[in-house]
Amino acid sequence: MDRFLFPKWTNAIVPVLGALGAVGALYVLGMVAFAASPETTDVGYQPEQPLPFSHALHAGKLKLDCRYCHNTVEVAGHAAIPPTSTCLNCHSGAGADGVVNTVSIHSTSSKLAPIRESQATGKSMQWRRVHDLPDYVFFNHSAHVRRGVSCVSCHGRVDKMETVTQVKPLSMGWCLECHRNPEPSLRPPEFVTKLDWVADGDPHEVGEKVRKELNLNPSTNCSTCHR
Amino acid sequence: MDKKYWRSLDELHSTPEFEAVLHREFPAAASEYPEGVSRRRWMQIMGASVALAGVSGCRWEDEKISPSVSRPEGRIPGMPQKYATFMELGGLAESLLVTCYDGRPIKVEGNPDSPQSQGASSVFAQSETLSLYDPDRAVGVVERKGGTRYTRDWQAFLEYSDTVLGQARQDGGAKLRVLADVSSSAARKNLQEKFSALYPKSRWYDYTANSRDNVYAGAKAAFGEVVRPQLDLTKANVIVCLDEDLLSEHPAALLYTRQWADRRDPAAGPMNRLYAVESRFTTTGVASDHRLPIRSVDMGFYLSKLEAQIQARLSGKQPEAAGEDYADKVLVAMSEDLVANQGSGLIAIGASQPAELHARVFNLNELLGNVGESVRYTKEPLATDLSAVEALRELAGEMQAGSVETLVILGGNPAYNAPGDIDLVTALSKVPNAIHLGEYEDETSLLCKWHLPKTHPFEQWGDARSYDGTLCVAQPLIEPLHDGKSEVELLAILCGEKHPVALDLVKDAVKGSLDSMAVNASWRRVVHDGILKGSSLEAVSPKIKPLPPAKVVEAAGEDLELVFYISPQLYDGRFANSGWLQETPDNLTKVTWDNAAIIAPATAKDLGVKFGSVVKLILDGKSIELPVYVLPGQAPNSIAVALGYGRTAAGMVGGDVARDVKPVGENIAALQSKAAMNFAAGLKVEQTGKEYELAITQDHHSIDAVGAGEIKGRVGQLVREGDVSEYDANPDFAKERTHHPPLKSLWEELSYDGHAWGMSIDLTKCVGCNACSVACQAENNVPVVGREQVIKSREMHWLRVDRYFTGDDVDNPGVSIQPMFCQQCELAPCEQVCPVAATVHTDEGLNDMVYNRCVGTRYCANNCPYKVRRFNYFNFNKVYEDPNRKLQALVLNPEVTVRHRGVMEKCTYCVQRIKAVQIESKNEQRPIEDGEIVTACQQACPAKAIEFGDLTNKKSLVAQAHASPRSYAVLSELNIKPRTAYLARILNPHPSLAKPSSEGHGHGEQHAEADHEKQADKH
C-alpha cells in the first residue's frame, strides 16, 4: 500500500489553524482581563430586594442620616442592616387592638406588607446582599468611617439610588489604590455620611490635613485584610 | 554540651527506623493518595471538581442578610460578646468566659475573675465548643422496646414517667433508685432532697470514675471529719508530691500551676523546690526538680521511710543512714528540706493512694507545722457516706436481686466505666424502667429503656462550686440545640413539676448565698461575673487524732503492678468523641488516638517486649490486649494504662460499633475491681506476637534533619537549662550556650518604627499541659486529621509542644518541654524561597501567610528551621461543606479563614486578635495598652509562661522578658532573628543532688572572635 500523503490543499489549513489559535489566545486573554474582572462582573449588580426600599427617598429626599439605620457602622466591622423594628419606628401597622399609631406613615401600604409580616411572624427580612466581599476578606467599616473615609467612596451616591447598585469594583487592586494614596478619599470624620460633601479647597490638601490629624497610615500588609 | 538530649529511645540508640525518619524530608507516604482511593478514581474526582468549578459561574452565591426582627439591647451584629459560665468535672466547677459570635459560642477562655482558675483554662474546657456542635450528640427522646429504637418526644416521656412514678409514689419509691454523676450544684441538692421527701424509700447513689474517696477517708481517719485540703503553693519553698499530679490532674491544678509558677522566677526571689515521687510520668514529674520513679504499691513503704527520716530530724537525732543510690539520696534531701522549711513546705499525696497513707500525710504536714501556712483545710461538701465504687456495687447488687424497678441515671456513663467486677450490663437488663439522661446515646443509653437528651453546659442554667468553694453560675449561651433538658430540669419533672423553669430553680438554690438586701441585683451580678466573690468554703481547723502506730510496711515484692489513670485527654471517656482532644498528643508519650501500656525500658527488656508489641495484660483472671509504649522514666515493674478509651458507642470520632466505627484504644476499666480501682500488683504480661502502630508525633517535625550526632549537640541549644546556682553565678549562661561567628545578614535588615509584635515563653514555668495547643486549635480553625494521617506526619497543629528527654539515665531521665510555633523571624527563611510571595513580611514584623496566593510548593516548609509550617494535604475541612453538617460548621471562628487543600498554614500570632485591638484603639484614638492583645495560647496558659506584646514599648512585659538575661533565641546562629524569645529553664536542685555544672561549649563548633575574647575575659 502506498504511504498516505496529505493532499497539497491541506497546507492552507496550517496558517488558518495558527490564526485561529492566535485569535483564541487573544480571546482568552481578553476574557480574563476584561470579562472576568470585577469591573464587568460586579459593577452594576442590582439585585431585587424583597421590598422596594428607596434610599433615594429616605437618605436623599428625607435626608435621614445613614447611621439612623446602619447604626453599628462606627463601632463594628459590619454596617448592620437594620432590624425590622427600625422600619417600624415610622411604618408600624395596626397594633393588636387594630389601632394604627397616629404617627405611622404608610401603615397600610401593600409594598410594606413584608415588614409587617416580619413583625407579626417574628421572622427576619431576607434582604439580598449587594456589596459582597469574599469570605477571606475581613473588611471593617468602623476602621474606615472613623478615619474619615466616606460611605460614598465605596458605595457611591446611595442617596440617589432607587435600588441599591454596586458602583465600585471592590476588587483588591481597587482597595489598594486608596490604601496607597489615601488623601483624595479622606475628609473630616464628621462629614463621612454627608454624601454630597465637597472639599472646601484642594481635596488633596484637606485629605492630607485629616491624615495628619488622625495619624493615618493605611497598611498594605496582607494580614490587614486577610487572616 | 555535657547533658544529653533525646526525644525517643529510637533516637538515643540511633536505630535504623529513626535514621530513616531523619533522612526523609516528609515522612513516608506523606504525599500519597488517601486510603481507599485509587489513582484512577482520584483523577476522576479531581476532573469532576474542575468541571463543576466552571459551571458555578462568575459571581459567587447570592447571599442573604437576615437582620433580627428586634435587635436586643447592646447587641452589635458581628461583634463577639463574652458570657460567663462554667463546666463541671467530678463535681467541681471551672469558671469560664465564652466568646459568642452572633449568638453562637465559638471560643472558651478561663474566667479571670475566678480565684480558682485566674483566667486559665484546661484542655477539656477548651474543647467544649467542639462538643457543643458535635453532630453525634443525642438529638431527642428515645425509647427502646424489645431491641427496637423508637423516636419519642418529651410528652411521651412525661406520660410514661407519670405512670411509673405514680406507682412508685404509692410504695414510697421502694423500688426507685437514682444513679447520678457527682455534682456540687445547690439546685440539684434541693431537688434531691425534694425527691427523697417525695419517695422516702428511694435511694440515691453518686458515682464518678475519678473519685477522691481516698482523700475523704484519709481525712476521716486523721481528723474524725472529712475536710478538703487547700494548698497554698506560693507559701511553699518545698513541695513533695507522692503520686500526686498537682499541676495537671488535681481538681485545683489551674490554681496550683499558677501558684507554683509564681515561685519559679529566679530573678524575683527564692525559687521553690519540687520533688515528685511517682510511678508514671506526670506533668508534675516533668516540672519537678527531682523525680523518683517508684511503683505506686511501694508508696507506703517510701512514706514510712520518709516519716522515719523526718521524725528523726525533728527530734534532733541523726537519721538512719541512707544508702548511696539515687532514691536514698533523694529521700535524705527531701526530708532535710522539709525539716528545714517547717511551715513553708508541704507534702501532697495522690487520690489514687489508699486512705491510710492520706491520714499519715495529714499527720506529717501537722508535724512539720505546715498546717495553717501552706496547707489549710475547708469543709468537704462532696463527701458521701458510700464511696463511689461502693455505691455502684450496692446499686448493682440491688438491681441483680430484682429489687430495682425504676432507675434514673443522671449523666455519666456507668455501663462503660464501671469497674470490671461490677456487671452493670446484666444488672441493667433486670431493671424494667431504666432512664438515662445523657448528652450522647452511649453505652449506658443502649441498655436503658429511655434515653433523654441532656443539655450541654453551654445550653443550661446551672450552679456549682469550684475547688475552693467559690459559687459559679452558668447562663445558657444558646437555646438547647437538640431539645435537651438539664439534670435540674429532669429532676424537677420527676418531682412532679410539669414545666420547670431552670432559671428559677437555680436562682432559688443560690439565693441563700446572695446579698439578702438586694437579691435581684446580686443575682444579676453573679450571672454577669459567673462567680460570687468571697464565697469560698468555710475554713476549718480540725484536730488531728493520734494515729495508731503505722504498721511496719515492708517493701512489696518485685511483682508487676498495673496503674489506672484518668486520661489527660479524654478524662473518664466522656470526651472520647472530641477530635481535638483525641488528636492532642499526650504530653509525655506524644501518642494520639490511642491508649497504650506504658512500660519502663528495663521492664520491657525483662519482659522481652518492645515498642509497639501488643501484650496481654492479665489481672485477676481478666485480660486485655494493648500495644506497648516504652517510656523512659516510667517506674520499673509498673505498667500504666489510661482510662477513658475503648468507647463502643461514643460516636463517629471516638468509636461506634453499631455504625462500624472501631473504638479508639481499649477500655481498661474491665480490669478494675474493688481492690484495684487505682493500681494493683500481681499483673501478668503475656506476649501476643502481634504488632501495632501507634500514632505518635514525637519524631515528627524534627528540627534537625542532619543526623543524630548533630542533634545531640544541638538540642541543648534549643532548650537551654541550668541550675539556679549556675544562674546566680552567671545569669547570662543561656546566651553563651551557642557560639557562632559574627552574624552578617545576606538580606537587608528591616527596621520597625511602629509596632513590633513579639512573644516570650518562659521554659522555667511551662509544664507542658497542652492547654495552649488546644486553645490554638479552637481559635484558628485548625483541622483534625485522624489517626492514619497523624501516622503520616500530617497533623495540623500550629502549636506543638516539643518534649526532650535529658540525661544519660534511661530509667530516670529529665524532661524538657518547649512549645514551638512560628517564630515570626525578621529575616524569615520561608519568605526567601516562596516563588509566589505567598508568605511575606509586614511592617510590624509578622510573617504573613497568604492562603490565596499559595500554590503548595512546600518550599517554605523545607526551609523553615523550626518546622512549624503545616500543609493541607487534603481538604480537611470538607466535612463542613456537607449540607448535613452545617451545625458542625458553627464551631469555626468567623474571624479566621478556613483553609483549603493544597495550602500551607502556620501560627500568625493570632493576627485577628491583634487587628481587633488595633482597630478599636485607633477608633478611640488611644495607644494600645500593654497586655491588651492576648493570644489564644497566652490566654489559656495556667502558668503564665507566655507573654505577648509590642517590643518597641520597652515597658511591655514581653520587652522586659526579651531583655531578661535568661532570654535566648532558638537557632540564633542562623541570624534569622525570631520574634519569639525563650527564657532558659532554671532548675532548683538540692545542693547535694545537683549535677556538676554543665557549663560548656557546643562540640566542634567554630568560635567567634568576639566570643573568644569574652571567654578570655572571664578566665
Image (spheres, coloured by chain):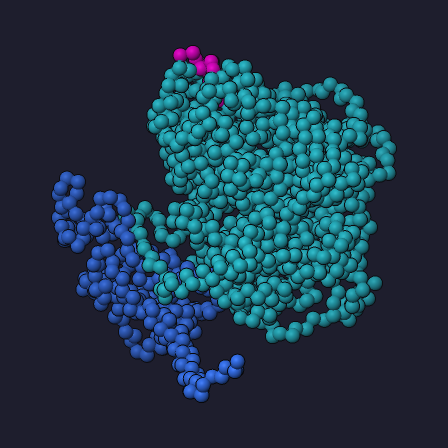
Q: Which quarter of the rendered picture does the C terminus of chain B lie within?
A: bottom right
Which of B233/A128 is in front?
A128
Q: Is residue A18 visible?
A: yes
Q: Residue drawn at (47%, 56%), measured in percent from left and top?
A: B898
- Give the quadrant of residue B272: top right
Q: Is residue B177 magenta?
A: yes
Q: Is residue B577 visible?
A: no
Residue B23 in the image, given as x and y percentages of width and height: 71, 60
Which of B906/B643 is in front?
B643
Drawing shade for chain B: cyan
Q: Is residue B526 magenta?
A: no
Position of B509 compared to B353: left or right?
Answer: left
Image vertical order of residue B690 relative to residue B899, above or below:
above
> Hey, which residue is sitting farthest front in the picture?
A1
Which of B495/B880 is in front?
B880
Q: Residue drawn at (26%, 57%), measured in percent from left and top?
A: A68
Residue B156 in the image, given as x and y percentages of width and height: 36, 27
Q: Which quarter of the rendered picture does the N terminus of chain B lie within?
A: bottom right
Image vertical order of residue B226 relative to residue A201, above or below:
above
Q: Which residues are magenta?
A: B170-178
Residue B460 in the image, given as x and y percentages of width and height: 42, 36
Q: Residue drawn at (57%, 39%), measured in percent from left and top?
A: B663
> Hey, which residue is sitting farthest top in the picture?
B171
Q: Which chain: blue?
A: A
Residue B616 in the image, given as x and y percentages of width and height: 70, 34
Q: Residue drawn at (66%, 68%), measured in percent from left and top?
A: B975
Image vertical order of residue B491 relative to residue B103, above or below:
above
Position of B320 compared to B77: left or right?
Answer: right
